[in-house]
Amino acid sequence: MRTWLRIFFVGGVIAFRGLFNWIRPAMYIPTMLGSPLFQLIFFTKLGQYARAQPADFYIVGNSIQACSMASVYGMTMAISNERQAQTLGPLLASPANRAAVFLGRGVPVLANGLLVSTFTFGVGALLLGFRPGAAAIPSLVLIVLVTVTSCTAFGMLLGSVGLRAKDVFFAANLAYFLMLLLCGVNIPLDVLPGWMSLVGRCLPLTHGIAAAREVAAGASLGHAAGLVATEAGIAVAYAAAGFVLFRYFERASRRSAVLDAY
Amino acid sequence: MSTWRVIGSGFVMNLKMLGTSGFFILTSVVQPVIFATIAFYMFKSGGRPGTLLYTALGAGVMGVWSTTLFGSGGMIQWQRWQGTLELSVGAPPPMVLVYLPFSLANAVTGAYALAATLVWGRLVFGVPLHFAHPFLFAVALVATVLALGLMGLVLASTFILYRYANAMANLLEYPVWIASGLVFSTSILPAWTRPISWALPPYWGVLALRHAALGGEVWRPLGMVAVLGAASLVIATGTFRIFEHYARARATLSLT
């Protein structure tokens, strides 16, 4: 059990430090903090011009969605960059528990996603007048935590695809932009066509954002519990699917001798 | 003659490279269509009238800017990674002439974005494609794409000294969309941002395109696009020379 935990925590942190491309401040600050900041301003101003929704709608949506940059790209890098660094072979030749190897990589990514979301909420409060009320903040923290977890689990699935796909970052970029469209970040789901909102409801973010909007508007956490539970269920489903895919591609790559090959 | 050959061969080569890059297909076609869709639905839910063509044009220019930005940020960095930067710097033509066709090819690839958002808008949202001044629209499109390419050249020159050019590219995408008023009027921004908007070719470019499509005075914004494009070329010629010298003197040209 101690070894399992060591691989889970220490291995996760080492993998993050080694494989997350944007870890240096010169990369991290413009990409992980600067870009969400301007994204928030862009969509809030666009919403204001379109006379669509109040500013809080965009602040909550984009502040939570900001975590997906950390989670989706971070997790994709944390798994699939092993292949790029030619370290996948040695890693998979080790007897380390695969669940610890796989899930442990999610911990630093999750912490990073929380940081990015918190920063974007802070910008919303500072520059755009977001005032959810002190009583709502603990509930918002919990909802953001659950949502970041589900985004990280979604990133695990994409990262697993990266064990075999030639250009997984194309898929990661595409997923990131589609989440912006389909998850109710800037458009209420009832405005989207039925099939789009259905896809959105199967993705991470959607229920978490809806729950956060309710809580920010003054509802209790109990009132949004169903949405939070659905978001948590989506997290478990994506993490499980990601792990199954990881094991499948590991076996298939070993059988075909294409572990580090492109 | 040799100058035109450098420009022509560099342009064609980079156009081919970009055409095979999944990332640039995403940036120049898929991303603008997604952003156009988001903007269409936001306007639909808000009910501001007569904004569909306005949105399609703006989202298209957003794509031109994204492609130019990532292309300009990437062209120095990718050459660093591939070990070909020294060869480009060591070649007889001035560095600005080597990278000018690359930057223009980035912007031309970005022009796919405008075609994509207009076609998408027409097919999916029924955007009426009736341009008030079709000829001026074509002129404005060429001028805007060229000016953005030249603006990208200025950015590329600064990336000679900066090792994390792709991070700056990630940062600069939204601010230029905002300050240029590509999908919303800059009148809703604070007054202090106006001079920034006026200094940006995309601000005048989208204005010229909008006026050519929807009606309005085209020549003044078109003139500003030309002036700012020419200014960008002059600035880039100077900055390429200065930054190249610094990078060579400090031996940081190929450091990654």
Image (cartoon, coloured by chain):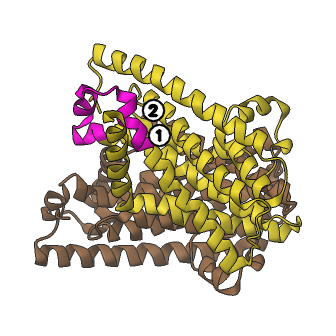
Chain colours: A brown, B yellow
Query: A217 and B157: which one is in front?
Result: B157
* Disc 1 residue crowd, few under 14, some 14–19, many 20+, Cα 10 Å: many
Q: Chain of mark 2?
A: A
Q: Secondary structure at mark 1?
A: helix
Check residue B86 for magenta coloring.
Answer: yes
Q: Locate residue A143, reporting x and y percent.
A: 65, 62
Residue A117 in the magenta stretch? The answer is no
The image position of residue A110, as x and y in percent, is 49, 55
User: What is the C-alpha distance between the residues marked 2 and 1?
Assistant: 7 Å
Q: Which residue, given by chain and number where applicable, does mark 1 sit on?
A: B167
Which of the numbered marks, if any, corresponds to residue A26? 2
Residue shown at 80%/62% (left/top)? Answer: B132
Q: Chain of mark 1?
A: B
Residue type at numbered disc 2: Ala
Locate the N terminus of chain A and report the quarter of the image it occupies. Answer: bottom left
Cβ atoms under marks 2 and 1 closer than 8 Å? yes
Say the numbered circle drawn on residue B108: none
Check disc 2: other Cα within 10 Å, few if <14, some if 14-19, many if 20+: some
Return the x and y of residue A259 as percentages of the image width and height: 16, 67
- What kind of residue is marked 1? Ala
> Start and end of the magenta stretch?
B79-103
Query: Is residue A202 in view?
Result: yes
Foreground pick, A145 / B213: B213
Please check whether the numbered discs 2 and 1 fall on a single chain: no
Q: Quadrant of residue B243?
A: top left
Q: Nearer the viewer, mark 2 or mark 1?
A: 1
Point 29% across, 22% down: residue: B252
Q: Main secondary structure of the magenta part?
A: helix
Q: Nearer the viewer, residue A92 or A182?
A: A182
Quadrant position of residue A226: bottom right
- Total number of numbered discs in the rendering: 2
